[in-house]
Amino acid sequence: MLSLVGKDIHLRALEPEDLDFLYTLENNPSVWEISGTTTPYSKHVLKQYLENAHRDIYDVKQLRLCICKKDTVLGLIDLFDFDPQNHRAGIGIVVLEENERNNGIGTQAIALLCDYAFTTLGLRQLFANVVEDNAASVHLFQKMGFLQAGIKKDWIFSNGSYKNEILFQKIKP
């Protein structure tokens, strides 16, 4: 099992007992905009997902880890669109409870995952897609050394209107 430890949090692989957390998160409409979800997930579907979560990043092109404080799961952090040939991947993060945000958890989780991606996976760059009006995420990725590489105009259709999405990149130092 993968375990990455920071000052206040650690990242770990998904476990079967994460089903209820995953069900709550994936069925929370407030995070659907960032996840691209449009319909609720059943526990059955999520259980099947968890049964395959152990598959290798080189096979499924994704790595999803739980962000934990002691034994409590606070959120998820992902590498997605893993491209070993071009040494890059996307990174996404969500912390479920609003009262757990803006207190260093995201900073620690991104730092841990960036180190893992650059050191263990040998990636050269990471990218993040952030909706322009998500000020907290824009600030977080900028704080973590991601630079704005472009703006995707009218990229996200949400609540009856289009939103721009910022493309951030971080090149291995």
Image (cartoon, rainbow, N blue to C red):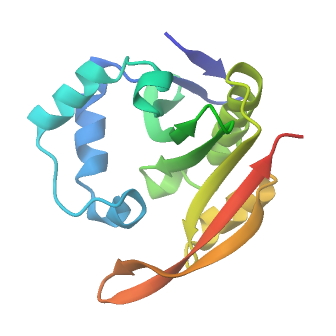
On screen, residue 22 above or below 168: above
Q: Residue furthest front?
A: 85
- Residue 9 appears in the figure: yes
On screen, residue 24 above or below 138: above
Q: Residue at x 71, y 65 (%)?
A: 139
Q: How many marks?
A: 0
> Residue 7 in the image: x percent, y percent?
73, 28
Q: Residue furthest top?
A: 1
* Side of 65 where 23 appears, left or right: left
The image quarter containing residue 22 is: top left
Q: Residue at x 66, y 21 (%)?
A: 5
Q: Residue at x 11, y 43 (%)?
A: 42
The image quarter containing residue 119 is: top right
User: In which quadrant is the C terminus drawn?
Assistant: top right
* Side of 18 where 137 appears, left or right: right
- Residue 71 appears in the figure: no
* Side of 36 where 119 appears, left or right: right
* Side of 50 where 117 appears, left or right: right
> Residue 18 in the image: x percent, y percent?
31, 27
> Residue 149 in the image: x percent, y percent?
74, 67
Q: Residue furthest bottom?
A: 161
